Amino acid sequence: MRIIPVASGKGGVGKTTFCLNLALSISRYGRTVLIDLDPGTSSLRTFLDMPVKKDMYHFLKKNIPIDECITPLNNSLDPEGLFKKFFLIASPKNFVHDIVNFSDSIKARLIQGINSIRADYVIIDNKAGLDTNVMDFLPVTNTGILIFTPKMKAATVTAAEMVRASIFRICQTLLTQQRFNFSIYSSEDKSDNLKVITSIKERIDEAYENDGESFEGFLIKLNKKFKKNIIIRIIRQFIEDYRVYFILNQFDSVQESADKIIKPFVERIYASISSKISITNLGWLIEDREIKKSAEYGLPYLLMQHYRKKQEEMKSKSWYSELESSMGINKKKVKKDIDIHEIMDDEISRQLNLLNEMYTHGFSKDPLANLDFIVEGIKAIGLSSTQDLGMKRILTKQEILRKFYSE
Ligand SMILES: Nc1ncnc2c1ncn2[C@@H]1O[C@H](COP(=O)(O)OP(=O)(O)O)[C@@H](O)[C@H]1O
Ligand SMILES: [Mg+2]
């Protein structure tokens, strides 16, 4: 199972639209459950106009097993059963306070429920922004998918902040007192460890004022003082393994996306956290009138298209393997501490090359092709030994500690 949370810095960037169509698209390759975790607006239900017998409310408040709260597509939406492997866990129809503002016990039940779902893919439509209700559903070593649009510049900045916050949140967990139970603390470096923990914690707390130096830069300095310290090593390894995937929605020009999204996003992450974080563009979705209309009809775009015309044979699939290397799926990670500006320029030009290549291959014109491209990418990453996307289960804090300290 792959749990892929989709997050955005701001609302209105097309997260629900994307989640729904991604889930439909990927369900052709395996059992897929789409979870609406944005219950305040319950927008997935308006995008998908069909009766739902049991939803998140029944699971969270009535103790009904999660399997019974999963709804298949209604016959009226999918009369030929083209999307038999697509399922939805809807959010409650009406406002239920502690489902909108998760209490700790509700959250724990939800995480346990999601982990127990039988599926090949679980796609989570998160709330927009940065609160803990979102953060707790983001993966530990590789993010899910971030989505933003050149139409809303502020969403890009917030998305970069989300990456930083999610990295710092895991670092905080790795620096908690509970770790004193772990064997490394009985070693002779005990007092060094304490000093290291205090300095990193202070640096994270003051991150807001530290715009000049990246977090990685700070760790390198700290490492010079406390040579071979295990905590610094673990935190640096965690950052090196961290992966960011993103989608551009309402994409309409390479140049516009480059200037408004890719440059500021990559620059911000590199400058404030580390140039070792790998950032991958999974593709885009163009702005399309039919997509807009589909929301008004309560009929997902992908269903609409499949029933309007039998989908033509995709021209050629060979484009994908050509693009794999430019997407960075086979890219080796840069381990040496080389000049950050050099890596940054490299990274930005790699991302731009990819966009240009996709553009010239003609995969920009049709949202169905856009979605196919994204799904092929997700599948390829799933098969790759060096890349990863999503998570096998949502980890609790204890599990996060065990994962990092036992390795
Ligand atoms: N690629 C697109 N082309 C046209 N309209 C879009 C596209 N993506 C989203 N929209 C429209 O933008 C609005 C916001 O999308 P939505 O998915 O609800 O955003 P979010 O979940 O991020 O708040 C909706 O009216 C939707 O139909
Ligand atoms: Mg939404």
Image (cartoon, helix red, strand yellow):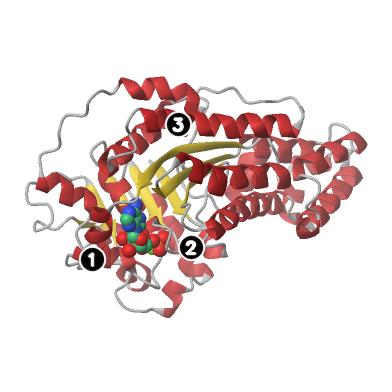
Three-letter amino acid code at disc 1? Glu
Seen at 52% across and 27% down, the residue is: 328
- Mark carried by residue 356: 3
- Discs 3, 1 touching: Cβ within 8 Å: no
Q: Quadrant of the N terminus?
A: top left
Question: Could you say where residue 48 lies in the image, as x and y percent from the top left?
Answer: 23, 62
How packed mark 3 is, by other alpha carbons closer than 10 Å (few <14, some 14-19, many 20 or more), is: some
Q: SS of the residue at dot 2?
A: loop
Q: Specify which label sits upstream in the sequence, 3 or 1.
A: 1
Marks 3 and 2 sit apart, C-alpha to C-alpha, by 29 Å
Three-letter amino acid code at disc 3? Asn
Seen at 31% across and 20% down, the residue is: 318
- Discs 3, 2 touching: Cβ within 8 Å: no
Residue 308 visible: yes
Q: Specify which label sits upstream in the sequence, 2 or 1.
A: 2
Residue pointed to by mark 1: 296
Question: Could you say where residue 66 lies in the image, as x and y percent from the top left?
Answer: 31, 59
Q: Nearer the viewer, mark 3 or mark 2?
A: 3
Q: SS of the residue at dot 3?
A: helix
Residue pointed to by mark 2: 128
Depicted 277 relative to depicted 96: above or below: above
